[in-house]
Image: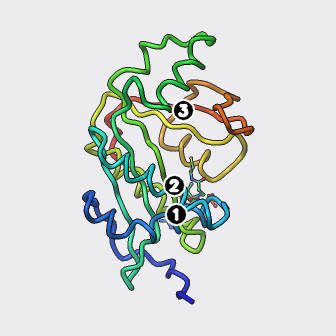
Amino acid sequence: MTAAPSPRCDRIAELTTDQLRARLPEALQVYVTAMGYPPSTAQQRAPMWSAHMLRAGWRCIGAFSEQDELIGIGYGYLGAPGQWWHEQVRRGLMTSEVAIGDWMDDYFELTELHVHPAAQGGGLGESILRRLLTGAPGSKVLLSTPEGPTRAWKLYRRVGFTDVLRNYRFTGDPRPFAVLGRPLPLEPR
Ligand SMILES: CC(C)(COP(=O)(O)OP(=O)(O)OC[C@H]1O[C@@H](n2cnc3c(N)ncnc32)[C@H](O)[C@@H]1OP(=O)(O)O)[C@@H](O)C(=O)NCCC(=O)NCCS
């Protein structure tokens, strides 16, 4: 049995593709635990996370405990036509009042942001998010998150994200999602 990660963050650092590959099982463990998904989801997601690392503008930030355990992870890349998420959001915008050209060009897709539950509620998610977006490519950032009053929602609103699409259904997921966005760069805290 592995010890539960310490909630105390020792350092936040940018990860290269090689560094994330080396710690991919650990990162996916943070992801499934934070999201409350079954452990088998980690294995299913590994090929997708590996493919994302090869996309233009990919950037990843990790948070580490004093014991060098990964306790938080965030990554994203430049969105582009042909990518599944891009096409899904584009489809949603076609039936909305929002102009596709306002958002779907030159944007950084914030793909994943997760903090181990033992380390949540102390500002770590915001620190990872700010570090990830500071220096991210693109003139704006877009993300999707399940609808509902969650800590993620509070965080995104606090950092200035506004509605792009609400109650949107992605193919294959019955949950309603919001797509949120904001211009880049971020204002300093
Ligand atoms: C969303 C998520 C990444 C946010 O990370 P987090 O570290 O828990 O949250 P934040 O960085 O926003 O910190 C927020 C809390 O820390 C508190 N906080 C902020 N700075 C602090 C500091 N310096 N000292 C102590 N507490 C602090 C805030 O008051 C806030 O508390 P509250 O939410 O109880 O009101 C995390 O909760 C998570 O992984 N959730 C599950 C997965 C998920 O939903 N991911 C997003 C998918 S789109």
**Residue type for callout 2:** Arg
Amino acid identity at mark 1: Val
Ligand 1 quadrant in view: bottom right
Task: Decide: is 175 above or below 5.
Answer: above
Residue 98: image location, x then y, percent = 55, 13
- Residue at x 64%, y 32% (from the top left corner): 170
Task: Identify the mark nearer the N-term, 1 or 2.
Answer: 2
- How many residues crowd around disc 2 within 10 Å: few (fewer than 14), some, or many (20 or more)? few
Label 2 vs label 3: CA separation? 23 Å
Q: Is mark 1 within 8 Å of ligand 1?
A: yes
Checking the image for residue 115, the label placed there is 1
**Residue visible at 60% across and 20% down?**
92
Mark before the other along the chain sequence, 2 or 3 = 2
Question: x%, y% of residue 61?
Answer: 35, 58
Which three-letter amino acid code belongs to the residue tagged 3?
A: Leu
Task: Label 3: state its secondary structure.
Answer: strand
Residue receiving disc 3: 180
Name the foreground residue: 182 vs 85.
85
| Residue at mark 1 to residue at mark 2: CA–CA distance | 17 Å
Q: How many marks?
A: 3
State the SS at label 2.
Answer: helix
- Is residue 75 left or right of 100 when viewed as pictured? left
Rendered location of residue 165, percent (x, y): 61, 24
Residue 28 in percent (x, y) is at 49, 64
Look at discs 1 and 2 and give the one toward the viewer: 2
Above or below for 97 versus 48: above
The residue indicated by pointer 2 is 45
Specify the label residue 188 is tagged with. none
Ligand 1 within 8 Å of the CB at mark 2:
no
